[in-house]
Every structure is written in structure tokens, then in C-alpha cells.
Image (cartoon, rainbow, N blue to C red):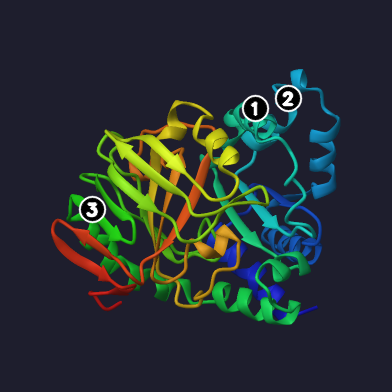
């Protein structure tokens, strides 16, 4: 076994989730994360906790949509809800052998299912949870790398001194929390929003691993202007390119894309909350410098920002509710992040050294 898998498991158990004796933990993986799941299981059991491994292959999920009549998509899995409710820690390992397995599924169907599972997602967010990734050939292909190259990329982003990284990000957190008005300026972009009295949260590997971002929730009705995303937004394996969004009083009033505009429309129309922003995030992970078509890594690219339509995180003070939370990423190499009239970042480089 690659010794980096053991180090990965150690970070998840001892730092990301800090599992304790007697706690109930669920470890979920899809296709190829078995080795990491087992390492986490062993380390969790050694502490005296109660781990349980759940495997949900991607082909099973695809089969669900292929064979489930539309009228049954609202069925609520109360048994799984009870399991989540009784758990203290939830660990999810992305490990697909096919990242496009849902590409041809009608987005309306996945939207219906997302709404049906909202209570489970809300319960999950109350727990100590961690989302990470086990490198597979599918992810490597998306990143246009060999598997070995991709493994090196993944572990360079994950196996970091997260206590040290947190201290660096504290400087940015304090600066943003002392501010109020954020303006994003760039190509086809001039977007304003207020973050007054909202908490700026540091992603230091405790929830998402890798970490490497600071994020908050804009005041729901303050978002005004337009934004162009130069990087594709990906949802269930489908790419939406050249997204343009226009906001008035916090709501999306116009949108377009050069590819899969129907999917974009379907996502925006999911519910009332999906027409508003739930998150403003700023990437800070210097171990991630390239776009790999995987949001877990891409939203942390140093010198990028991302905005999510839909659900806001309550830990930020956000109020927006939605069945979705869809991140869209923009590079800032030709742009600026301006806080209360002062440039914080210009052309992808922070003014404050950290």
C-alpha cells in the first residue's frame, strides 16, 4: 500500500474529524476507495469508536435513475436518515471509476431527488463531517494526467501541515471580517455584495480535505451586478461553460452559457433559494495551481474565487435555503477583489502576505 494512504487516513481521523472513543462513525466510498476506507476504519476502531463502512457504487446510483419511476423519486429513505442522525461523524470518500456516469440523466430527475433528500443533507451538516478523495484513473483522465502524476498532485494538496496553513489563513479571515462591501472586478465581471457581520470560515482540512479556502455567505439581497466564469462549472459529470450571471437585489435575473444551458436553467430553477448566492469563497491552497475538473480541489486553487448558488452554510451566518449548493469558479489573474474600496487581491496575488 502507498504509505501516503496511511498518512491521509491519519489526518482524517486525528485532525479532520477528531474521532473519540464511543462515537459512531460512517465511512462512505463509491468505487475504488476501499484501501483508504479500511485504513480509516482501523484507526477509528483503535480509538474505541464504532465505525461502519458503506459502499455505494456509481453504477448503482446510475441504475437508480434508469429504473426508478419518476413518481418514486420523492421517496424518503427514513432508515438512512436514522443512521445519519445516530452518527457523530460522517466521512465521505470520492473514488469514482467514471466521473460521467450521470451525464445523460435528465437534470429534472436529479433535482427532484435532491429535494427529497434535503432533510438528510441538513442533518449531515450538523455532524462532524469530512469529504475527501481517493485518486482513480477517472479523476486522472479528467485532469489530463497519468495516475501517478495525479496521485502526486492529490497528496501534495492533502498531506500538508494544516495547523500551519490555518494560521496563515487567519490573517485573511480577520481582514474580511473587519470589512463590509466586497466588489469583484474582472473580464465581463463587476459584482458587488455585502458580507457585513457575516462570519468568514477557514477551510483548513477539517471538512473538505484538501482544505485551502476562506468562505462566507453574502447578505442574501445585496448581490448586484454581473459575473463571467472562465472555468467550466461541473454538475454530475456535465460541464457548463462560459456561464454568465446577472443579479438584481440578490436574485439571478439573467443567465447564459455556451454549453449545457438547459442544465444551468434547471439548476437555477430548482427552488427559490437556488436563484441566490449561498457562498463567496477565495482559494488559498498553494499546492493546487491547475484546474482538474474536480470541485473539491478546483475551488481551492490559489488566485481564484468561487460563488455558489443555493444553500448557504449556517456557520457563516447565511440564511439562504436550497436543495442545491453549486460552486462556480473564476480565475482572478486579470481581476481584483476589493474590500471597502481597498484591493485585497490583484491579478491573482494577495496584497497581504500570508
Say few, some or many: other residues with alpha carbon within 10 Å of mark 3 (under 14 / 14 to 19 / 20 or more). Answer: many
Q: Residue at x 56, y 57 (%)?
A: 17
- Farthest residue to the front: give it: 258
Secondary structure of the residue carrying numbered label 1:
helix
Residue 182, labelled with which disc? 3
Q: Secondary structure at mark 2?
A: loop
Q: Earlier in the sequence, mark 2 or mark 3?
A: 2
Q: CA distance from mark 2 to mark 3?
A: 40 Å
In percent of width and height, residue 69 lies at 81, 23
Mark 3 or mark 1, which has the lower sequence index?
1
Q: Is residue 247 above or below residue 28?
A: above
C-alpha separation, residue under disc 2 versus residue under disc 1: 7 Å
Q: Residues within 10 Å of mark 1 (few under 14, many from 20)?
A: some
Question: Which residue position is annotated with label 1?
Answer: 112
User: Residue drawn 73% across and 22% down?
Assistant: 75
Q: Secondary structure at mark 3?
A: strand
Which residue does the numbered mark 2 point to in the structure image?
73
Quadrant in the rendering for residue 106 = top right
Tell which residue pokes out farthest to the top in this image.
Answer: 71
Q: Are marks 2 and 1 in contact (CB under 8 Å)?
A: yes
| Residue 56 percent coordinates (x, y) | 80, 46
Quadrant where the C terminus lies?
bottom left
Q: Position of residue 25 (x, y in %)?
A: 67, 48
Amino acid at each position: 500500500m502507498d504509505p501516503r494512504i496511511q498518512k491521509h487516513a491519519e489526518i482524517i481521523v486525528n485532525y479532520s474529524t477528531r474521532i473519540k472513543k464511543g462515537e459512531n462513525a460512517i465511512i462512505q466510498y463509491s468505487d475504488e476507495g476501499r484501501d483508504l476506507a479500511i485504513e480509516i476504519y482501523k484507526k477509528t476502531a483503535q480509538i474505541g469508536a464504532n465505525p461502519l463502512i458503506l459502499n455505494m457504487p456509481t453504477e448503482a446510483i446510475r441504475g437508480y435513475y434508469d429504473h426508478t419511476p419518476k413518481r418514486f423519486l420523492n421517496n424518503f429513505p427514513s432508515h438512512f436518515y436514522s443512521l445519519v442522525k445516530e452518527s457523530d461523524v460522517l466521512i465521505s470518500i470520492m473514488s469514482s471509476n467514471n466521473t460521467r456516469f450521470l451525464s445523460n440523466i435528465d437534470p429534472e430527475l436529479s433535482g427532484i431527488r435532491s429535494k427529497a433528500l434535503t432533510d438528510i443533507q441538513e442533518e449531515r451538516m450538523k455532524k462532524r463531517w469530512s469529504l475527501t478523495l481517493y485518486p482513480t484513473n477517472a479523476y486522472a483522465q479528467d485532469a489530463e494526467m497519468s495516475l501517478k502524476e495525479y496521485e502526486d498532485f492529490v497528496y501534495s494538496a492533502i498531506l500538508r501541515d494544516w495547523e500551519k496553513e490555518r494560521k496563515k489563513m487567519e490573517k485573511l479571515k480577520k481582514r474580511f471580517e473587519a470589512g463590509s462591501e466586497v466588489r469583484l472586478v474582472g473580464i465581463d465581471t463587476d459584482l458587488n455584495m455585502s458580507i457585513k457581520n457575516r462570519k468568514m470560515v477557514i477551510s483548513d482540512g477539517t471538512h473538505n480535505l484538501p482544505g485551502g479556502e476562506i468562505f462566507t455567505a453574502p447578505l442574501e439581497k445585496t448581490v448586484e451586478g454581473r459575473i463571467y466564469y472562465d472555468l467550466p462549472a461541473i454538475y454530475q459529470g456535465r460541464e457548463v461553460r462560459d456561464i454568465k450571471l446577472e443579479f438584481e437585489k440578490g436574485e439571478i435575473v439573467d443567465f447564459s452559457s455556451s454549453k449545457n444551458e438547459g442544465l444551468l436553467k434547471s439548476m437555477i430553477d430548482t427552488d427559490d433559494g437556488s436563484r441566490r448566492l449561498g457562498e463567496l469563497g477565495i482559494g488559498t491552497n498553494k499546492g493546487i495551481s491547475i484546474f482538474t475538473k474536480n470541485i473539491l480541489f478546483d475551488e481551492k486553487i490559489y488566485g481564484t474565487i468561487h460563488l455558489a448558488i443555493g444553500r448557504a452554510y449556517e456557520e457563516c451566518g447565511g440564511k439562504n435555503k436550497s436543495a442545491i449548493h453549486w460552486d462556480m469558479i473564476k480565475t482572478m489573474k486579470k481581476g481584483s477583489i476589493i474590500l471597502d474600496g481597498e484591493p485585497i487581491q490583484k491579478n491573482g496575488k494577495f496584497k497581504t502576505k500570508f
